Amino acid sequence: MAKKVVASLQSSSKDFAKVIQVVKSAKTGAYTFKEEIVPNDKVQEFIGKK
């Protein structure tokens, strides 16, 4: 499935990036990963969210 996502992103006119963010659960203290594909100009905005 990842190959299909990458192939579709390369054919697009916009540039995208896959952002992976580590999030710590307040309830259990466990770490989880939040992944999202965002346009390059929105990467800093995504990282700034908590």
Image (tube, helix red, strand yellow):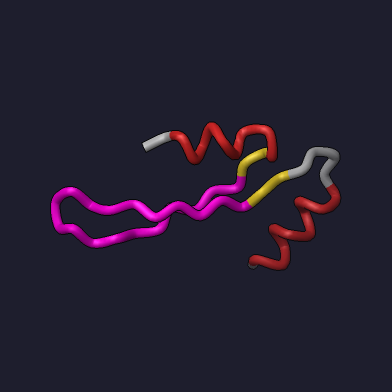
Is 25 left or right of 17, judged from the image as shown? left
In this rendering, the answer to whether 46 lies above or below 10 is above
Is 49 left or right of 17, judged from the image as shown? left
Kindly identify the residue that appears in the image at 57 percent across and 36 percent down.
Answer: 44
- Magenta highlight on residue 40: no
Q: How many marks?
A: 0
Looking at the rendering, which quadrant does residue 30 occupy? Answer: bottom left
Secondary structure mostly taken by the magenta-highlighted segment of the chain? strand
**Residue 5 in the image: x percent, y percent?**
69, 58
Kindly identify the residue that appears in the image at 23 percent across and 52 percent down.
Answer: 25
In this rendering, the answer to whether 31 lies above or below 40 is below
**Residue 2 in the image: x percent, y percent?**
65, 66
**Residue 11 in the image: x percent, y percent?**
85, 50
Is 27 left or right of 45, judged from the image as shown? left
In the rendered structure, which segment of residues is drawn in magenta? 18-37
The quarter of the image holding the C terminus is top left
